[in-house]
Amino acid sequence: MKQQTDRPALSAECKAAMERVRRENEVFLAANGRAPRVFVLTFGCQQNEADSEKLLGLSLAMGYEQTDLPDQAELILVNTCAIREHAEQKALSTVGQYKHLKAKNPALLIGVCGCMVTQEHRSEELKRRYPYVDFILGTASQHRLPQVICKRRDASRRVFDREDISSPMEEGIPIRRASGYRAWVSIMYGCNNFCSYCIVPYVRGRERSRDPHAVIAEVRALVAEGYRDITLLGQNVNSYGKDRADGYDFADLLRELDRIEGDFWLRFMTSHPKDAGRKLIDVMAESRHVAHQFHLPLQSGSDGILKAMNRHYDTARYLSIVDYLRERIPDVTITSDIIVGFPGESEEDFEGTLAILRRVRFDMLYSFIYSPRKGTPAAAMEQVPRDVQGARFDRLLQTQNAIGKEQNQPLVGRTLRVLCDGESKTNPALCSGRTEGNKIVFFEAGREHTGRFVNVRIDRADAFALYGERQ
Ligand code: 5AD
Ligand code: SF4
């Protein structure tokens, strides 16, 4: 790896705008006896969670205080998702609920950020039908939050900043992490794959890899701070480094991160089967910190549908990766994404997907009914009727539930290392945590174990979780 000049930390323009908002917020504090408050709401994937940690970090650096209550806030940021129609509708209806808050608090600024608003038609819709939204901030514009706030305060016009989605991301944005022991680290942004169903390449731009030095420094600092579970994020992590001249790739990065001393798990997502290679699996197998877990989206078990999806692999290639993974890492947990009811999916195609489920025996599946996305090729193809999609989706879940349960049974009687997340939200009498394979475990423990590794003897397992006793 050759030394590269890091992009300079936050631009002078951003710093100046931050300073100005900070001073204005001090005036607010003097007048009101409290700092102005920020409320950040996140929809969608881990990348969005990571982006929100930056939006919050920037806001705190400008003198806002965090609140969990939108009606207490002077700044509301809604970070949206566009992956399926349902995610967009949820975000829009939430933004709709904030209309009345503006009437109560004229100082309130409402900003809508992220993937949904990066699409032109949604940005126009917010312009026309949501006049109380003060600004939008596209996926590559987070670092301009301070400038956008200044612009909005100066002008009577609202600000619609969704430019240059493929521009390099700034280093040095302050991050306020939601957890003190699990962390997201973005290693690259964007996607070049253009799977025919997917909106991501249109809203997150082309692939841009972060400088490895910046990633290594961030992970090293997290480990030093006591973070125990670090997930490297990218739309397609296997493409890491392809935009670099020196051939340094994701496996190289992982190998280097594995040299960091400390007690922590390293994960990554998401991998694309077309370029998840043996080198990566070898690095995993030989590593000390890389968790024995692999998320490898299959999407469909039909070669014809994979072609129509523009996925650039077939089922034989997918199975060869799985076989090599299991050969090198016998206890690996394998999870996947499946889309049901993609345009043109026949009964036979769908049976092909079920057949792969039975062959691979995934530990867990994230399954989705195909949702047409405006502007993507698949939206113009012949659609599968809703009721057929629904029936196939139910069959997929049934098949996977049985497999998931069977996959978890061999863990009964074993003692596993679990990173404790504290009181379970679904069952407050118990704590929950995650294994190295990222399986959820419920057990009795005091809150003081939150963020620590504990040993749990598993005495029961169902399709979605393990249950046991702390040792
Ligand atoms: N409809 C349904 N699911 C989708 N995904 C991506 N785009 C769509 C869509 N239009 C799923 C894929 C991807 C996961 C993050 O979301 O399975 O891997
Ligand atoms: Fe979407 Fe395909 Fe890129 Fe994943 S790899 S973000 S599914 S286009």
Image (cartoon, grey):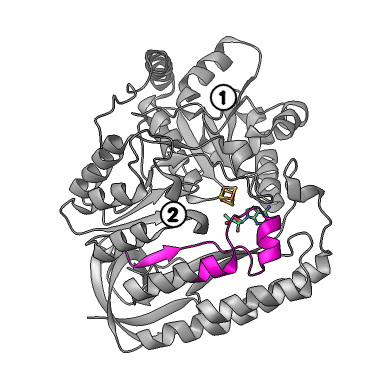
Q: Nearer the viewer, residue 228 or 56?
A: 228
Q: Nearer the viewer, residue 457 or 273?
A: 273
- Residue that carries the numbered disc 1 in the rendered image: 164
Q: Classify mark 2: helix, strand or loop.
A: strand
Q: What is the distance, in whole Å, between disc 2 and disc 1 at their CAs?
A: 25 Å
Which residue shows up at 18% across the image and 50% down it? Answer: 260
Q: Can residue 120 be seen here? A: yes
Which residue shows up at 63% across the image and 70% down it? Answer: 301
Rendered location of residue 347, percent (x, y): 77, 75
Q: Classify mark 1: helix, strand or loop.
A: loop
The circle drawn on residue 269 is: 2
448 is higher (above) or lower (below) than 189: below
107 is higher (above) or lower (below) than 188: above
Residue 424 falls in image quadrant: bottom left
Q: Quadrant of the C terminus?
A: bottom left
Residue 209 lies left or right of residue 347; in this view the side is left
8 is higher (above) or lower (below) than 332: above
Check if residue 310 falls in the magenta segment. Answer: yes
Which residue shows up at 37% across the image and 33% down it? Answer: 245
Rendered location of residue 425, percent (x, y): 45, 65
Residue bounds of the magenta highlight: 290-319
Residue 167 lies left or right of residue 201; in this view the side is left
Q: Quadrant of the N terminus?
A: top left
Neighbour class for label 2 at 10 Å: few (<14), some, many (≥20)? Answer: some
Residue 434 falls in image quadrant: bottom left
Which residue shows up at 37% across the image and 69% down it? Answer: 437
Q: Can residue 428 be seen here? A: no
Indicate which disc, 2 or 1, sits on the residue closer to the N terminus: 1
Rendered location of residue 414, percent (x, y): 29, 85
Amino acid carrying label 1: it is Asp
Neighbour class for label 1 at 10 Å: few (<14), some, many (≥20)? Answer: few
